[in-house]
Every structure is written in structure tokens, then in C-alpha cells.
Image (cartoon, rainbow, N blue to C red):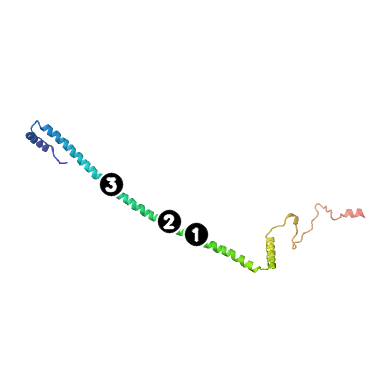
């Protein structure tokens, strides 16, 4: 602290012994030791207080930097969220417009067809056309209605194993006559 060497301490001790005397020197040395101890504790307390203040200032700076970084991050997140919300709202608006256009395009032919078919005869003709179109898409007829198409010729069934009960056999003709 004061950079006092051993020779300087010996000189101070000899001067103190001559000035104070051998009776009061131990009391003065003890008191001086207590005062130097208090001085050292006081200096160390001041140093620790200064260090705490410096650390507190550093922590405050660090806290402020963290706060500004958090605010900047929050601002960027908010701007991104607003951008996404804007994109979603425009997508929803375009989808709504597309749905509205689709609904209008579906409704428009129905209203024009209804206006064209004003009389009952026209309604009946339209129903007949729809039934005919449905019959073309219906598929094969059920089991009970097995009919051959008019353009196909059905070949006659050949007798199996020579047994045809519809046509009389030549032997049967001879026996009947």
C-alpha cells in the first residue's frame, strides 16, 4: 500500500521508542495496529462498493441492451404478423371473390334456362331430353328386361349334343307316319 521496506520500519520503530519510551510504546503499537486494520477494512469496503457500482452499471447497460433488442425483435415480429395477416386477408378476399363468381356462374345458366322454358310443353320436352340422356348413362337393363338391341341379330341357339326338342327328329317322322 505505502511501499515501506523493512529498513524504514526499523527506523520508525527506533524513533518511536526514543520519543514514546518503553512504557507507552506497546499501547501505541497496539492502537496503531487497530487503526491500520480499520483503515484496511475501510479501503477494502470502498473498493468492493466501487466494484458493485461498476457491476451494477454494467448490468443496467446490459439490461438496457437486452430491452432494446427485445423491443426490436417484438417490432419485427409484429411487422411480420401484420404482413401475414395482410396476405391472409387478401387471400381470403380473393377466395371469397372466386366463390362469389362461381356461385354467379352456377346461378346464371339456371335462370336463363328457366326463362327459356316458360311453357308447360317446353318443360315436358326438357324433361324428356333429360330422361333420354339419363337412359344413355343408365347401363345394362335389369334381369327381367333382357331385350336385344334392334341393330343386333341374335343367332338361333344350336342344339346341344344333338338334342333339340323343338325340331322333330327324322326318326320321329318315320314313326309317326
Q: CA distance from mark 2 to mark 3?
A: 36 Å
**Residue 106 spot, x, y in % from top left:** 59, 63
Left or right of 14 in this view: 38: right
The relative height of residue 23 versus residue 166 in the rendered view (above or below) is above
For label 3, the SS is helix
Left or right of 133 in this view: 94: left
Left or right of 63 in this view: 8: left
The disc, 2 or 3, on the residue closer to the chain's N-terminal end is 3
The disc, 3 or 1, on the residue closer to the chain's N-terminal end is 3
Q: What number is the disc on residue 56? A: 3
Q: In the image, what residue occupies the spot 53% across and 62% down?
A: 98
Residue designated by label 2: 81
Q: In the image, what residue occupies the spot 64% across and 69% down?
A: 116
Q: Nearer the viewer, residue 111 or 40?
A: 111
**Residue 157 spot, x, y in % from top left:** 79, 56
- Confirm or deny contact between disc 1 and disc 2 (CB under 8 A): no
For label 1, the SS is helix
Left or right of 142 in this view: 19: left
Q: Where does the N terminus fall, quadrant-wise?
A: top left
**Residue 54 spot, x, y in % from top left:** 26, 47
Q: CA distance from mark 1 to mark 2?
A: 16 Å
The disc, 1 or 2, on the residue closer to the chain's N-terminal end is 2
Binning the other alpha carbons within 10 Å of mark 1 as few (below 14), some (14 to 19) or many (20 upward) gives: few
Q: Nearer the viewer, residue 9 or 80?
A: 80
**Residue 130 spot, x, y in % from top left:** 67, 63
Binning the other alpha carbons within 10 Å of mark 3 as few (below 14), some (14 to 19) or many (20 upward) gives: few
Residue designated by label 1: 92
Q: Where does the C terminus fall, quadrant-wise?
A: bottom right
Binning the other alpha carbons within 10 Å of mark 2 as few (below 14), some (14 to 19) or many (20 upward) gives: few
Q: CA distance from mark 3 to mark 1?
A: 52 Å
Amino acid at each position: 500500500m505505502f511501499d515501506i521496506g523493512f529498513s524504514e520500519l526499523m527506523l520508525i520503530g527506533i524513533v518511536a521508542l526514543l520519543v514514546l519510551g518503553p512504557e507507552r510504546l506497546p499501547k501505541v503499537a497496539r492502537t496503531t495496529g487497530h487503526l491500520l486494520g480499520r483503515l484496511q477494512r475501510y479501503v477494502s469496503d470502498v473498493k468492493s462498493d466501487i466494484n458493485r457500482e461498476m457491476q451494477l452499471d454494467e448490468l443496467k447497460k446490459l439490461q438496457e441492451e437486452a430491452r432494446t433488442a427485445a423491443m426490436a425483435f417484438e417490432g419485427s415480429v409484429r411487422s411480420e404478423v401484420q404482413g401475414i395477416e395482410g396476405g391472409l386477408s387478401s387471400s381470403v378476399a380473393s377466395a371469397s371473390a372466386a366463390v362469389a363468381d362461381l356461385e354467379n356462374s352456377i346461378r346464371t345458366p339456371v335462370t336463363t334456362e328457366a326463362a327459356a322454358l316458360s311453357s308447360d310443353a317446353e318443360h315436358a320436352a326438357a324433361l324428356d331430353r333429360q330422361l333420354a340422356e339419363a337412359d344413355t348413362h343408365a347401363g345394362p337393363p335389369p334381369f327381367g328386361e333382357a331385350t336385344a338391341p334392334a341393330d343386333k341379330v341374335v343367332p338361333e341357339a344350336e342344339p346341344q349334343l344333338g338334342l333339340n326338342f323343338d325340331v322333330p327328329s327324322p326318326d320321329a317322322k318315320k314313326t309317326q307316319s
